[in-house]
Image (cartoon, rainbow, N blue to C red):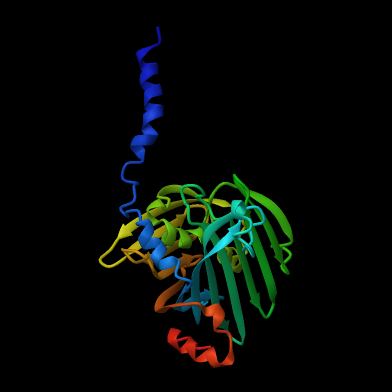
């Protein structure tokens, strides 16, 4: 006969994870597909301009951030934008791409940073971004990092003029990309991971602080305030916390963010202006006044 205590212990082991998840369910409802498609599939990108206050070298520096969200057809096998998606339908996947562009000046010289994340729209079928690229340029030199999702891990390529950071190729076990959280807010905010998670920190943060590219322990939370949600990521292994503010209703626009790391270094972004545009068709000199619609300074 199996001891009663043993049975109770085994039942506890089975059911405790279920009970411990109570309170971790998202309050955000799933978006209606017709509403979603009506916003993201009208042949335009959502372009948002933010005032940036960037912590660097023990000081804060004014700058600009532009987030560009746009849907496109992506190759599952090559993990690049497809030229002929209708010809190779079995290889095509719809993604929401986020291009993050950051610029700020430190003293005499300028930083230019860009990252791209490709999040499948069918989050249930493909819960992780297929690809992340990030580059940082300043007068000292440049760095580049690429992460490709390969089923159960991210394969990383990392190149840098810094000896400590590059050149490297390695794989990281399954974990969330901090950089993909921004697109997940727009695609399926009800699926944001809550509680204790494994997280790969922001590519920009890793570069600016020369922190090892690794999977870190983090605590995530979602809090509803008067007029917005705040999603937070607090790392227990490194001194870093990210808070992203976004709208409480679709399309869940990003309103701003606060990063705190190191010795209380604080970086913030605040939304100034948003517009929808097929910007790739407006690349002539006569189109430059359109930048005024976003209040871009340069």
The image shows residue 75 at horizontal and vertical percentages of 62, 57
Q: Nearer the viewer, residue 126 or 260?
A: 126
- Image quadrant where residue 253 sits: bottom left
Q: Residue at x 46, y 62 (%)?
A: 182
Looking at this rendering, what residue extends furthest in the left direction? 226
- Image quadrant where residue 247 sits: bottom left
Looking at this rendering, what residue extends furthest in the front direction? 87
The image shows residue 114 at horizontal and vertical percentages of 58, 72
Q: Residue at x 35, y 53 (%)?
A: 30
Q: Nearer the viewer, residue 141 or 36?
A: 36
The image shows residue 244 at horizontal and vertical percentages of 41, 65
The image shows residue 82 at horizontal and vertical percentages of 63, 62
Q: How many numbered marks are there?
A: 0
Looking at this rendering, what residue extends furthest in the top direction? 1
- Image quadrant where residue 167 sits: bottom right
The quarter in which the N terminus is drawn is: top left
Q: Residue at x 48, y 71 (%)?
A: 43
Report whether residue 242 is seen. Answer: yes
Q: Nearer the viewer, residue 264 or 217?
A: 217
38 lies left or right of 144: left
Q: Is residue 45 above or below residue 159?
A: below
104 lies left or right of 148: left
Report whether residue 61 is seen. Answer: no
150 lies left or right of 48: right
């Amino acid at each position: 006969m199996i001891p009663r205590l043993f049975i109770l212990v085994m039942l506890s082991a089975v059911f405790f994870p279920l009970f411990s998840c109570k309170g971790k369910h998202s309050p955000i409802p799933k978006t209606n597909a017709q509403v979603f498609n009506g916003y993201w599939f009208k042949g335009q990108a959502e372009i948002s301009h933010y005032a940036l206050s960037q912590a660097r070298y023990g000081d804060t520096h004014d700058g600009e951030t532009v987030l560009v969200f746009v849907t496109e057809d992506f190759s599952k096998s090559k993990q690049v934008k497809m030229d002929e998606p209708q010809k190779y339908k079995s290889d095509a996947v719809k993604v929401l791409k986020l291009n993050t562009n950051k610029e700020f000046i430190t003293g005499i010289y300028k930083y230019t940073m860009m990252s791209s994340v490709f999040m499948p729209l069918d989050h249930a079928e493909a819960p992780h971004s297929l690809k992340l690229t990030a580059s940082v340029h300043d007068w000292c030199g440049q760095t580049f990092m690429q992460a490709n999702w390969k089923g159960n891990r991210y394969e990383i390529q990392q190149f840098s003029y810094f000896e400590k950071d590059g050149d490297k190729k390695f794989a990281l076990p399954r974990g969330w990309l901090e950089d993909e959280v921004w697109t997940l807010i727009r695609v399926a905010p009800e699926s944001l991971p809550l509680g204790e998670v494994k997280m790969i920190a922001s590519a920009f943060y890793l570069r600016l602080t020369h922190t090892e590219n690794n999977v870190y322990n983090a605590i995530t939370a979602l809090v509803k305030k008067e007029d917005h949600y705040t999603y937070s990521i607090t790392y227990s292994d490194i001194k870093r916390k990210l808070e992203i503010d976004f709208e409480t209703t679709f399309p869940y626009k990003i309103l701003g963010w606060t990063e705190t790391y190191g010795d209380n270094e604080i970086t913030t972004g605040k939304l100034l202006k948003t517009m929808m545009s097929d910007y790739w068709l407006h690349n002539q000199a006569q189109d430059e006044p359109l930048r005024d619609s976003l209040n871009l300074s340069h």
